[in-house]
Image: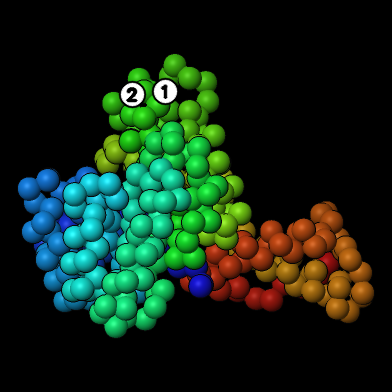
Amino acid sequence: MPQRLRRSVLACPGSNPRMMEKAAASAADEVFLDLEDACAPLEKPGARAKIVEALTTHDWGAKTRVVRINQVGSRFAYLDLLEVIRGAGAVLDCIMVPKVQNAGDVAFVDRALTQLEQEFELEPGRIGIEVQIEDAQGLMNCDGIAFASRRIETLTYGPADFSASMQLPSLTVANGSPDYPGDPFHYVLFRLAVAARAAGIQVIDGPYLAIRDIEGYTLAARRAATLGYDGKWVLHPSQIDACNAAFTPTQEMFERAVAVLEAYRHATEVERKGAVMLGDEMIDEASRKMATQFYLRGRAAGLEPRQTAAAS
């Protein structure tokens, strides 16, 4: 399955029709309509129908359309799946599953989707799964979780619930702590990235709660991009531009990737060499692999090479 563009993942309460309408018109790559934390318990049953209406009536363009259900052990999860798939399964791209702790949580959703696709005559296996890792148990089991279903398209980090799980002395999710010399989440972020890449799926960073702190958000997004992440959540449209920029290669770096690929192609196909100099740098097969993933990210974001780079 081709990987979708997910630089910016906009969270939107499923109980708020006006916000869902605005989300459809936003510049986010993905929007998920939330039945979990963004919905008060008494609003959850009614929000399902609102989400179905939003998915089937608004113009979502090329956005990835996702619904986050409630935790699989809750009283809401089964009916979340049933009502959303029955009403909007034909236009839904993925189901997001929060607080996944083991492969069995994913298996429940996978099998339910299989049954519902058959019941409502939908294309088998088309609806993907986005998995959220939000506590210590989920992180311990993230390898098995990442391989738990062919439907899985992403692993997503949930920093707020994870902080609570680890009993961290913090009341917000922002850029680190003055009492800790490094990034307290670095291990978690990299651990999830390794599991995701091993499984051949995408990896997404979670939210940054200080909505008005665009500078801080940008730093957090760039850190995730440096670790190879595909994107990050946005909680407000004001964060979207910074997010998309952080996960889009610069034109200069994109051109460099094009040059590496062309130089390596010329070296191997014309000169019959396994390595060649490009400026002051030696490039080989490993260089080609790095340049390829960089090139693909740029093309997915709409970048075009200004000119074909020649080997030097």
Q: How many marks?
A: 2
| 69 or 22: nearer the viewer | 69
Residue type at mark 1: give it.
Ser
Can see residue 238?
Answer: no
Q: Which residue is mark 1?
A: 177
Residue drawn 23% across the image and 54% down it: 77
Q: Determine whether label 2 and label 1 are within 8 Å by CB.
A: yes
Figure quadrant of the C terminus: bottom right
User: Alpha-carbon distance for marks 2 and 1?
Assistant: 9 Å
Residue occupying the point 19% across, 52% down? 76
Q: Who is closer to the viewer here, 173 or 94?
A: 94
Query: Which amino acid is tagged 2?
Result: Ser
Vertical side of 277 occupied by 310: above or below:
below
Where is residue 228? Give x, y as percent.
56, 50
Q: Residue furthest right?
A: 272
Pointer 2 residue: 170
- Using residue 282 as the reference point, say whether residue 130 is left or right of it: left
